[in-house]
Amino acid sequence: MGKVTGFMEYERLEEGYEPVQARVKNYKEFVIGLKADEAKVQSARCMDCGTPFCNNGCPVNNIIPDFNDLVYQGDWKNAIAVLHSTNNFPEFTGRICPAPCEAACTLNVNDDAVGIKSIEHAIIDRAWAEGWVTPRPPKVKTGKTIAVVGSGPAGMAAAQQLARAGHDVTVFEKNDAIGGLLRYGIPDFKMEKTHIDRRVAQMQAEGVTFRTGVMVGTLPEGSKVTNWAKDTITPEQLKEQFDAVLLTGGAEQSRDLPVPGRELDGIHFAMEFLPQQNKVNAGGKIKNQLRADAKHVIVIGGGDTGSDCVGTSNRHGAASVTQFELLPMPPEQENKPLVWPYWPTKLRTSSSHEEGCEREFAIATKEFIEGTGKDKGKIKQLKTVRVEWQGGKMVEVPGSEQILPADLVLLAMGFVSPVASVLDAFGIDKDARGNARAGTDDAAGYATNVAKVFAAGDMRRGQSLVVWAIREGRQAARAVDRFLMGASELPR
């Protein structure tokens, strides 16, 4: 490393945020990235450790010490080359990845980890500004055709890799714009959609064809999955028209909360609420848009999706926002000698929490309570109970029931599986969790039980991170390339 003693000389510097009062008035990104000199100092903290655990902590195996060193040396152009060698879309991960690489950083054993995510963010933003991110069309075309179903990070990564290998790739997306849950799940204030748009333009220049508003198969009647499709295509048509089909749809089947009163108006899945605001931000119109204006909002679920609901509700001007978590409050600081280099359980406070939110832990919802008079049929209150974990089981705390005001309840308790009807339409075998059954090693090659049909990303592994989706998309691309050509030079 350029500065072998840097980790002893410099402290970690976090990226900045715009003030809360300013940022909640719009849906723009508000993170203030590192300046070039700040990124150089942060890169100097990389320890030149004998075994860089960060590489394995990162699902796409970013070559982190190398790009840190290049930033320290001021060689930003080679830094983005190294970063792109393992990660198709560092502008996505540099914004919304939780950075498991930092949890695995050797310096994190007894100090603050190297700010890997902020350095990655700085590298890719500079690369775009300098014009270093350009199309890489193939020199030779293979004549092979591939359908990629789903345009989230897994589908985009696979499509880009396959197009660069010389194949003709068509990406099918049921919604009206490319990006999957990046487009209609992640709020704009965490990642503006221009980052997707310029990658789409790059991929089109590389030969990828995008078809939006096309549903493959059908959704179950009454499904709450966001679907702005205007056309349909059958699995049989895809298998007939293409040499290979890769399924990369998201895990969009939300976990429900079947307690009394669930049918009341005003109780919605997070993925009914969040996509609508993104659609409006893009200039679209939503009839009877779900909004939190002047409402008492209860968000059930303590994860990232719940946090996104909190941030969006605050921007709507909610009267109050409360977030429930079934589990007890985790410790503010993890026991590093016990958990390092693995992802630790600890209290995580997001930027949305800082904008205004009451957080309740070890709490369960007992009942949704209907209003009276003009509020008949609508949610107006919510009954809760405190819970404890005894012998691995959840038990209610006697006498802890409470009634809270609730005009809007958002269910953000995670996702159980991909939409079953899509897999069923193809005749794909599923695992115990309802995901497509497909192995990931070189022998299995992401192949399903159906000839020339492959699966990757959330469709195969279930709900996961954007960085895992990119990894699976890249690896599945290699598997499909090898299936079509007998061998592949694409990286795993």
Image (spheres, rainbow, N blue to C red):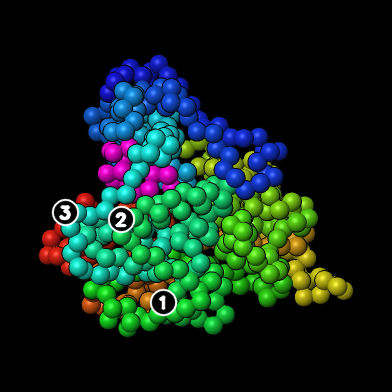
Q: Which residue is mark 1?
A: 216
Secondary element at tag 3: loop
Q: Is residue 31 above or below residue 192?
A: above
Q: Quadrant of the N terminus?
A: top left
Q: Is residue 22 above or below residue 358?
A: above
Magenta stretch, residue numbers: 80-92
Residue found at x 24% / y 33%: 51
Q: In the image, residue 195 lies at what x, y percent? A: 46, 48
Image position, residue 471 (x, y; %):
32, 53
For badge 1, the amino acid type reads Val
Residue at 40% across / 72% down in the picture?
A: 434
Q: Which residue is mark 3?
A: 489
Q: Badge 1, how many Cα within 10 Å: few under 14, some, many 20+?
A: many
Across the whole image, how many numbered discs are drawn on residues?
Answer: 3
Label 3 is placed on what type of residue?
Glu
Mark 1 vs mark 3: which is more N-terminal? 1
Q: Nearer the viewer, mark 2 or mark 1?
A: 2
Please state the horizontal and vertical placement of residue 472, each as a whole percent of the image.
Answer: 31, 57
- Main SS, magenta region, reads helix
